[in-house]
Amino acid sequence: MPTLATYYLNNTVWPSGQTNSATVLYTDAELSSFAPNGWYKDNNNVYREVSGGSGSLGNSTACTTCGTLFNLGYGASAFAACCSGTTADFYLDNAAFASANNVYTNPLLTTFAANQFYSFSSKSREKTGNATDGSDFSAETNCATCFPAVGLQFGSTATIGCCTGTSTTYYMNQPTFAASTVLYTNASGTAFAPAGFYALITSGSSVYKEVTGNAGSMPSSTTTCGACATAISLCKGTSADDVCCTGCATFTNFSATTNGNFNAVCTATIGNNNFWHNGSGTYPVAGDTVFTNSGGTTTASNGHIGILDTDRKIVSIAGGNGVVASVAVCAP
């Protein structure tokens, strides 16, 4: 806030451009201490700027009528100004939004605001230029209805909507999903959401509503989502021995020699589908695990096995848990 104090001129007249106009401002009658940089105004509403650290006074200007502070919405369109929620302080040359001639960014109304749409109290106006007679500031119009955004999961059933549905942004006719009775796919509320189930997923209790018909209609109350199923892959057999020892063919079967020494497996006879591995290829690679049964309950022993993968290769197993340490091409 400005503060009132006594200052001293190096001449007799405060306004500039006149006989005996002051050029320097001081804080003491001895004219030994320069006034700090800043803006100074006399009782006749004439102001001057002190700058340079030497009390130097700039040209004087008469204060003009100060504008009225408004917190306005603004944007590139009337809808954006009314509904985006983006607001800032601006100044108008009238106490009524409807009667203002232009929009400014400072109280003295010397700096024009950007050309765009502005909104206040559910009304919008467009600023197209800097005319001060109102010709560049359109008449106010009613804001369109603003539809709040909400992220929902959609599905053809309540279970799909709640558990595995596709997440998309929708728009409501009320501030909350619970109170809303119409759902839209666009922010302007001109496209209705298709029929189906829409779930609001939260860390607490997720809820859903069903949209029926072609007008985005849904009930005024929500329904709590049921428990979502957890998928798991299981091997089913006729006995514990069956599932544990025979197991299901979830691993890749491949043919190899029996476990032997490094050089011998390059010429040893290759068996018929006598090993399995958990890798993604036809044959195991470094890091894959090799098993001696289809259920993957018994890992291959440390050592070496030979395979025919285009060329004869040596698969080296180490570590005591069937993990392939390396795969090397046999020497010619």
Image (cartoon, grey):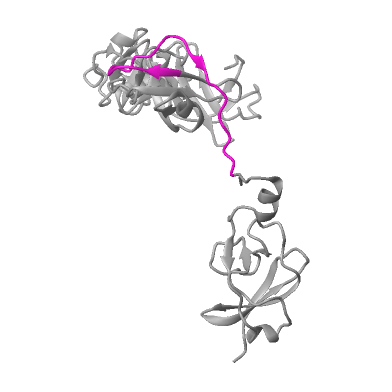
Q: Quarter-wise, where is residue 144 in the image?
A: top left
Location of residue 284 with respect to 91 vertically, above or below: below
Q: Residue furthest front?
A: 238
Magenta span: 209-233
The answer to whether residue 109 is seen in the rendering is no
Residue 138 screen position, x and y as percent: 24, 17
Q: Does 113 lie within the magenta span? A: no
Residue 98 screen position, x and y as percent: 30, 9
For the point 58% across and 20% down, the residue is 205
Q: Residue furthest left?
A: 135
Is 308 on the left-hand or right-hand side of 153? Answer: right
- Quadrant position of the N terminus in the picture: top right
For the residue pair 102 and 248, the one nearer the viewer reads as 248
Residue 21 screen position, x and y as percent: 46, 24
For the residue pair 191 and 269, the one nearer the viewer reads as 269
Is 311 on the left-hand or right-hand side of 323? Answer: left
For the point 37% across and 23% down, the residue is 196
